[in-house]
Image (cartoon, helix red, strand yellow):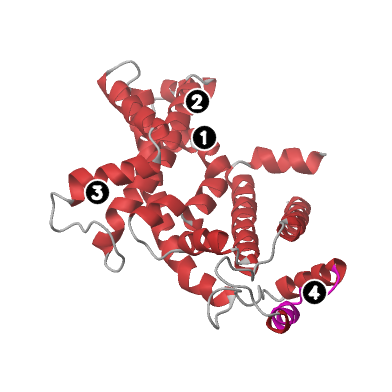
Amino acid sequence: MAKYILKRIALAIVTIWAVITITFVLMHSVPGNPFATENRKIPDNIMENLMKKYGLDKPKGEQYLMYLKNIARFDFGESMKQDSETVNQIIARGFPVSARLGIQAILIALIFGPALGAIAALYQNKAPDYISMIISIIGVSVPSFVLGSFSIQFIASKIDWIPIGGWGEFRHTLLPSIALALMPLAQFARLMRSSMLEVLGQDYIKTAKSKGISRFAVIMKHAIRNAILPIVSILGTTISNLVAGSFVIEKIFGIPGLGQFFTTSVFNRDYTLIMGVTVFYAIVLISMMLLVDIAYTLIDPRIRLTKEGH
């Protein structure tokens, strides 16, 4: 198992390096100047000082090596547009907001998604199954920003206790968390239903029932534990996507998360902030996937045995 984990860690490091390299090349391939403005021309001496300050006057190879060294120290540099603020400070201010929103959304999805899927499988072709699948279809089909706008129009505007936007108390997070959670919730429900139906038809389930074990014990100890494995396999990507934040949802509800800063940086051509946030997102995503891979081997020993057998 240790060998398998070390391989996954090495692969994660290589993937992060590839993302850093691709991001660097793409950003330095964009035509134009990050300090240029449409309204007025910056004097040559000021432009020269700005290029020197951010190391843009050096050869591309030297810039790349310096950028790798800075990232190794987890230093993403200074923002080119935010006054006297580093990218690290912006991430430290915005990420906890996005993380809180994402964690609440993933908890909602994990609590209700597998439960809906299990109920649908246990009552196949009956009313609970149809209701669960209707919810799943809505969750998969309707984008989160549509759900967010709908909830503002028909829920927040009707209930004084739930604010339309802003950030602070738990009630500010309720509607955006639900809007973010519905799509992964629907995916979990659909996966759980199909996996549960397959597991319930296995011989070991029939054997457990023939031994006189109660239906509840068979479902909880055998069926759900095995049926939930497909959800675990996509959990890393889902968590990282939600924790990183939804750009559109944060914009709709006026949430000061990291996604809002990233969107602004694109319009402002803030190269250091774009690169820093992109690499940070990549690190979060890959780290989550690595943790899920490790957790998957602990939940299902067959994965560990297969990998060690190669």
Above-or-below relation of 190 to 55: above
Which quarter of the picture shows residue 256? bottom left
Residue at image location 34% in from the left, 33% down from the top = 116
Above-or-below relation of 74 to 290: below
Could you tell me the amino acid type at mark 4?
Met
Q: Where in the figure is residue 61, as x and y percent of width and height?
A: 86, 67
Q: Secondary structure at mark 2?
A: helix
- Residue 118 seen in this snapshot: no
Labels 1 and 4: the sequence-earlier one: 4
In the image: residue 54, left or right of residue 95: right
Residue at image location 38% in from the left, 45% down from the top = 181
Could you tell me the amino acid type at mark 1?
Asn
The reply to whether discs 1 and 2 touch (Cβ–Cβ < 8 Å) is yes
Residue denoted by label 3: 152
Residue 115 versus residue 181: which sits nearer the camera? 181
Number of the front mark, 4 or 2: 4
In the image: residue 204, left or right of residue 186: right
Could you tell me the amino acid type at mark 2?
Val
Labels 2 and 3: the sequence-earlier one: 3
Residue count near mark 4 (Cα–Cα under 10 Å), binned few <14, some 14–19, many ≥20: few
